[in-house]
Image (tube, grey):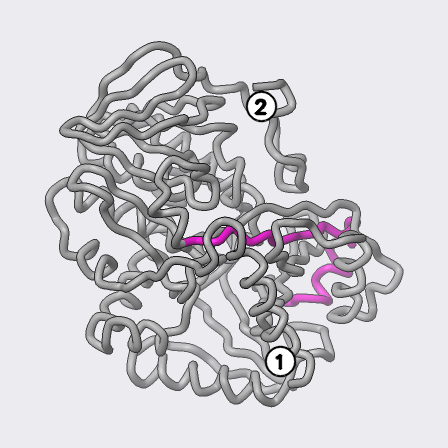
Amino acid sequence: MSQAGLAHAPSWYAESLPAEPLRAPLRGDQATDVCVLGAGYTGLSAALSLAERGYRVTVLEAHRVGWGASGRNGGQAIVGYGCEVDTLEHLVGHPDARRLFDFSREGMALLRQRLQHYAIACDWRDGHASVPINARQERGLRQGMQALVERYDYPLQWWDRQQLRGQLDSPRYRGAMFDPASGHLHPLAYALGLARAAESLGVVIHEASPVQALVRGARPQLRTAHGTVTANQVVIAGNAWLQGIAPELESRIMPVGTYIGASAPLGEARARTLIRNDMAVADVSWALDYFKLSADHRLLFGGRASYSALPPPNLRGVMTRRMHQVFPQLADVGMEQVWGGYVDITRNRAPHWGRLTPNVYFAQGFSGHGVAATGLAGDVIAEAIAGQNERLDVFERIPHKRFPGGKLLRTPLLVAAMSWYKLRDVIG
């Protein structure tokens, strides 16, 4: 792997943190209790939960800790999953949908507990607002909120336009569903903090160690170009970056490009006029915008998903225009940096977690909603490896279909489908 391949992907997140030395790549043959593929949130959380239970754990990462979506995302940690609860009810019925939603609340509690217990400094801030742009979106958001409050006992607040403007200085939105239990963080700092927490309990992490093959059997094995790890159990946490390791998993997810920009520094006073309570914000369009303030008083503004695996043309200009639509008062402010990466979505946007074989576990399909859910996934899998399968069994009851079209046609079909949803957003 080239030296360029050993660096974190360029982003404001990476530039805002001191560089860390490379963890030693895998060399030779090793044996352990559990081997984890991927040092993103899911893999690191599984490793940490397993180490807390006394297991010996080795993690193999193709690049650097948090190199993929875990280190580049919007940093919004939200209760729930990539799909709404009515989708879960359709897939598994209300009793299991309720269990799944309650598990997601446990995942948020676990995230907060780990930030405190392991002293992970990642600029955590409380509060998340989901905001509608048009009347159709407002009706849908209010209905969804009513279901969560009345049938799922989840406390949320509805803010009318005036109340929202008291916290968010944008004329674009009709109101907000505010969730005080969700929040946002510095995603790469969180990933690095999880890694240090896991290492403090004896977990071994090998960076620059791309896995080339999974060998299944009584004692499964992960192979790299320069070594192997044989284990009693394996956890596959590659998400959008499996690249042939487990074809039956790859057929049920689609890598989708998503993009974020960092504005020039605004200064504390000007930044605080934009989002007075420092919450994270996301609209509810299919091609959504999401944004928050950074600790150094920039606006971090994301959106503009690409379903074709090609970055949008003139990305910086597009992101700047979208930022100005939300905050016209920033007409004199541009994007200093833009970056992107892939998230993995499932057809139904529900999480896809389970077992490939009795000793090979996996979690994928976070569908852009993984900051809190990944921690839950790692803990649920660690729990199952330790012999407690109750929570994982519920996730395994969620049905998942392959994306149609095979490798050649599934991306064009998805692009066509998403174009319709984007048109629906435009016409309201």
Q: Which residue is mark 2?
A: 6
Taking the magenta stretch, the answer to whether it contains residue 272 is yes
Image quadrant in which the C terminus is located:
bottom right
Q: Of helix, strand and loop, which one carries label 2?
A: helix
Q: Quadrant of residue 212?
A: top left
Which amino acid type corresponds to the residue marked 2 in the rendered image?
A: Leu
Q: Which residues are magenta?
A: 253-276
User: x, y percentage for residue 103?
Assistant: 27, 61
Viewer-side residue, 47 vs 177: 47
Mark sitting on residue 303 = none
Viewer-side residue, 106 vs 62: 62
Residue 105 showing in the rendered view: yes
Viewer-side residue, 348 vs 335: 348
Residue 165 showing in the rendered view: no
User: x, y percentage for residue 179?
Assistant: 46, 71
User: x, y percentage for residue 267?
Assistant: 77, 53
Which badge, 2 or 1, is on the more N-terminal residue?
Answer: 2
